[in-house]
Image (cartoon, grey):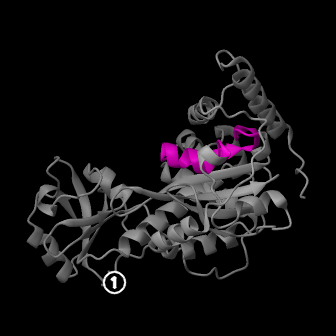
């Protein structure tokens, strides 16, 4: 079994803080006045305690039944197809880190695992098996259970997991939403006895966007609308995407589009209920391959909209292609980490504090990492 990696003074202090928080909640029943953990971690700990679970219990990482496993794989074929190229890219990006990727369905059952998985390491092998149940009810607080519950990206390190048996893991997770707006699963990046890498929370979030967009693009639609706010460049995974049927009804939307347009879960409305222009205008713009234009919404806001007939290739937009193999060998971890931090700062328009919050690290760490370059 791989021994724990040496830890820095800063990480030792963090592990001590986590341990103190565990003793406060599990021993005294309260974190008031003591070391804190993220609110969603505390809430997950309390849910586990409410189920009668105790941190010292042994867990077995059981697999679901064979029929249930077959059903999970069959029901999630669209997700598996959309995620496959992204997970392969992640495996290359994390080749030297000891972290690997796990894909689960909406119930927390593993449907795929990839990356540098050491199956001789029992702790890695136990969780990187198709069919194993990694839901909160089965294995307590993990990135998988909390992501599916909170439906937002999370980061957990060592003792932030509920059970003592899972305190060797560090993991980042992000939810995956289908074209109908519902959570269909989650993507997890996990390592065993590895240094803490909070930047992986940003990596898993960006990777989840790519998977969600691939799910939407695979849905039947006649028209594809790519959206962003005025002043933002179209063409990245962060764009809003909307599929539109021949009758003008919205057939699918990614999370960015849903947030921009104020949409709730499916069934989606007709385009004419969202955009303050005729649906014919959108179809005409797509057929004529017109460039993106600012269009009014009935909410009073305006968005950039690029309309394309399904299957066309807009010349002026080149979305990031995460499925392309890298032109060079694997990027060293320090360069990948720095690139992720720099990207987060750029996306925050230079706001280091906001970027630090997104990455789950301190502002001082952001400055230190960028200063080394």
Residue 84 visible (yes or no)? yes
Give the answer, above or below, for where 221 lies relative to 30. Answer: below
**Residue 39 pos. (x, y %):** 57, 31
Q: Nearest the camera: 238 or 349?
A: 238
Q: Is residue 180 magenta?
A: no
Q: Residue at x 56, y 35 (%)?
A: 40
**Residue 370 pos. (x, y %):** 68, 51
Residue 235 visible (yes or no)? no
Judge left or right: residue 80 versus residue 299: right
Can you name the residue that lies furthest to the top here? 33
Give the answer, above or below, for where 293 lies relative to 38. Answer: below
The quadrant in which residue 335 appears is bottom right
Q: Is residue 147 magenta?
A: yes
The quadrant in which residue 38 appears is top right
Q: Residue at x 23, y 58 (%)?
A: 267
**Residue 309 pos. (x, y %):** 24, 80
Q: Counting other residues with Cα less than 10 Å from the Cα at mark 1, is it few (<14), some (14-19), or many (20 or more)?
A: few
- Find disc 1 in the rendering and name its residue: 313
Give the answer, above or below, for where 260 lies relative to 356. Answer: below
Quadrant of the image for the N terminus? bottom right
Q: For mark 1, give the secondary structure.
A: loop
The quadrant in which residue 330 appears is bottom right
Q: Nearest the camera: 140 or 235?
A: 140
Please provide the residue range marked out in magenta.
139-163
Quadrant of the image for the C terminus? bottom right
**Residue 225 pos. (x, y %):** 27, 69
Q: Residue at x 72, y 49 (%)?
A: 170
Judge left or right: residue 216 versus residue 120: left
């Amino acid at each position: 079994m791989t021994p724990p990696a040496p830890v820095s003074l800063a990480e030792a202090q963090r592990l001590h803080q986590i341990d103190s928080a565990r003793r406060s909640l599990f021993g005294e029943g309260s974190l008031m006045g003591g070391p804190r953990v993220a609110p969603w971690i505390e809430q997950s700990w309390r849910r586990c305690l409410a189920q009668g679970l105790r941190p010292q219990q042994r867990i077995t990482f059981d697999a679901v039944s064979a029929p249930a496993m077959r059903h999970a794989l069959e029901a999630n074929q669209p997700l598996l197809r959309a995620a496959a190229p992204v997970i392969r890219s992640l495996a290359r990006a994390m080749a030297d880190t000891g972290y690997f990727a796990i894909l689960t369905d909406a119930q927390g059952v593993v449907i795929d695992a990839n990356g540098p998985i050491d199956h001789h390491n029992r702790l890695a092998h136990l969780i990187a098996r198709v069919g194993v149940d990694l839901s909160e009810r089965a294995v307590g607080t993990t990135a998988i259970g909390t992501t599916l519950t909170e439906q937002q990206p999370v980061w957990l390190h060592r003792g932030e997991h509920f059970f003592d048996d899972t305190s060797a893991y560090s993991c980042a997770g992000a939810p995956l939403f289908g074209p109908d707006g519902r959570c269909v699963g989650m993507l997890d990046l996990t390592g065993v006895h590895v240094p803490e890498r909070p930047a992986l929370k940003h990596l898993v979030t960006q990777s989840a966007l790519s998977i969600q967009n691939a799910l939407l693009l695979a849905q039947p639609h006649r028209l594809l609308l790519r959206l962003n706010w005025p002043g933002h460049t179209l063409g990245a995974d962060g764009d809003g995407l909307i599929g539109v049927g021949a009758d003008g009804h919205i057939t699918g939307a990614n999370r960015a589009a849903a947030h921009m347009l104020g949409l709730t879960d499916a069934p989606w409305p007709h385009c004419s209920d969202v955009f303050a222009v005729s649906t014919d205008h959108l179809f005409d713009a797509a057929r004529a391959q017109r460039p993106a234009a600012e269009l009014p919404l009935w909410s009073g806001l305006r968005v950039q909209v690029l309309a394309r007939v399904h299957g066309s290739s807009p010349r002026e937009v080149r979305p990031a292609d995460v499925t392309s193999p890298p032109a060079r060998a694997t990027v060293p971890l320090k360069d990948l980490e720095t690139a992720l931090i720099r990207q987060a700062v750029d996306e925050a328009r230079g706001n280091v504090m906001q970027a630090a919050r997104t990455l789950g690290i301190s502002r001082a760490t952001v400055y230190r990492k960028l200063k080394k370059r």
